[in-house]
Amino acid sequence: MQNGISILIAILIFSILVIFHEFGHFIVAKKCGIKVLEFSVGMGPRIFSKKKGETVYSIKALPLGGSCMMYGEDADEEKLDAEKDRAFGSKSVWARIAVVAAGPIFNFILALAVSAIWVVVVGVEKPYVCNLSEDSAAYEAGIRDGDTILKYDGARIFTTDDIFLREYTTTSKPSDDIKVVYKRNGKKHSTVITPKESNRILLGITYSPSDLPATVLKPLDEEGAFAKAGGKEEDVITEIDGVKIDSGKDFANYVQTHPFEERDIIVKVKRGDEEVELSVTPKLSKIYETGFNVNQERESVGVLGCVKYSYAYFRYNVNLVVQSLKLIFTGGVKAEEVSGPIGIVGVIGDTYKQSVADGIKVVLLNLASLMAMLSANLGVMNLLPIPALDGGRLVFLFLEAIRKKPIDREKEGFVHLVGFALLMVLMVFLFYNDIVKIVR
């Protein structure tokens, strides 16, 4: 039953993202006087269609993608009929740029709107220092409780999540110095934290301390306590010694308030659809610590604060996508670790299943957070200068604007056709990746 509901929720979220994206193309095309032949959600054969005015509105069998088919989009002007003045290609280059860019922009608008709802209902984690130990590296660098972090390791900071993202995506060594800019009593200060080498009792895992499930990230320390006890990459930690763990943030709070000891603890994880109970003995490990603790408690903000932090949350989601892409292209994330549509459906399903026990409000809020991230993801990905995507089309349009004449349509069409074929190969690879993960 839950699996069916999870799939329906995933289809609904995908559909909302696609509708917003294609509606962006649609509404701007209409404003520019372009005739829209079909507005569709999904791919493949039609399962429903209705013509209203000059446009056919349809739903297709595969709930992936969508399209806004415009008159004369791919045809030569001399092959068009008397309505060629309403063709996509007959409009000015700047009008066509606006139409193409509108899809990703509408995804950003959706991500920003959902972020605003999230901030109003949930509140924000302001990035001020708290619970700082006097023998920590951060304290020795001059940082004190109550200081508000403005920059951390070169990254601008608006919320605590920005700090966690920087720590997760950094390519620096754990022992490298960290530059910090902070504000105290209205004045800016800067300092450098030099991490201290120390021994800590650890599980031997990495994870993201976010609102999403506490998933064990790759690569897993094969010599660590968690791996030795039978733990695996992508296990989702749901309970530690009887304490329920709903998110990476819950896990971070648990570790902070319950330092591990060299004794057996019971860790419950979710592995696919299976619940697994592990007996783990945390082990002593050498690490580099800053002792840098920041606020993880959410608080309400006023109207002006809502505007500021809605943008901050939206910016975080865009930055998350950009930094993840950097990790993929620099080898920080392996190709087999990238998820496709099936993997995303799995994440949506896990989010629903782990939230449903806490009530419909928690479910909706967690799914809204995921939707904001996915909408930002779709916007960024579509702006990449890849043929067949909006970004690839924008490259040709900007070249036309610079050259004052269009690129040869046949050559451009061939480039987009090759790009589409490569995207289909990539989609097959992602489906294969997702299926292999499920089988494992």
Image (cartoon, rainbow, N blue to C red):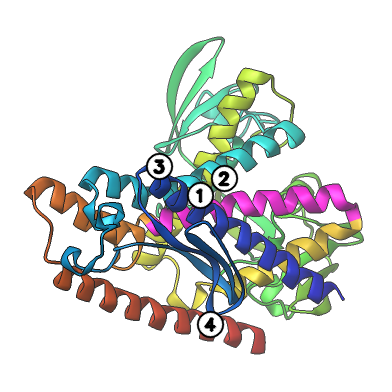
Estimate the x, y position of residue 105 in percent, counting from the top left. 44, 45
- Residue 110 numbered mark, or none: 2
Front-lying residue, 392 or 404 = 404
Amino acid type at circle 3 is: Lys
- Look at the picture and state if 179 lies above or below 362: above
State yes or no: discs 4 and 2 in contact (Cβ < 8 Å): no
Front-lying residue, 39 or 102 = 39
State yes or no: discs 1 and 2 in contact (Cβ < 8 Å): yes
From the viewer's perspective, is the residue at label 3 or at label 2 nearer?
Answer: 3
Relative to residue 428, is residue 92 drawn left or right? left
Relative to residue 232, is residue 70 drawn left or right? left
- Look at the picture and state if 307 lies above or below 112: above
Q: Which residue is mark 4?
A: 431
- Residue 107 numbered mark, or none: 1
Tell me which residue sits at (21%, 47%) in the image. 93
The reply to whether the magenta stretch includes residue 263 is: no
- Look at the picture and state if 108 lies above or below 346: above
The reply to whether the magenta stretch includes residue 369 is: yes
Tell me which residue sits at (25%, 52%) in the image. 85
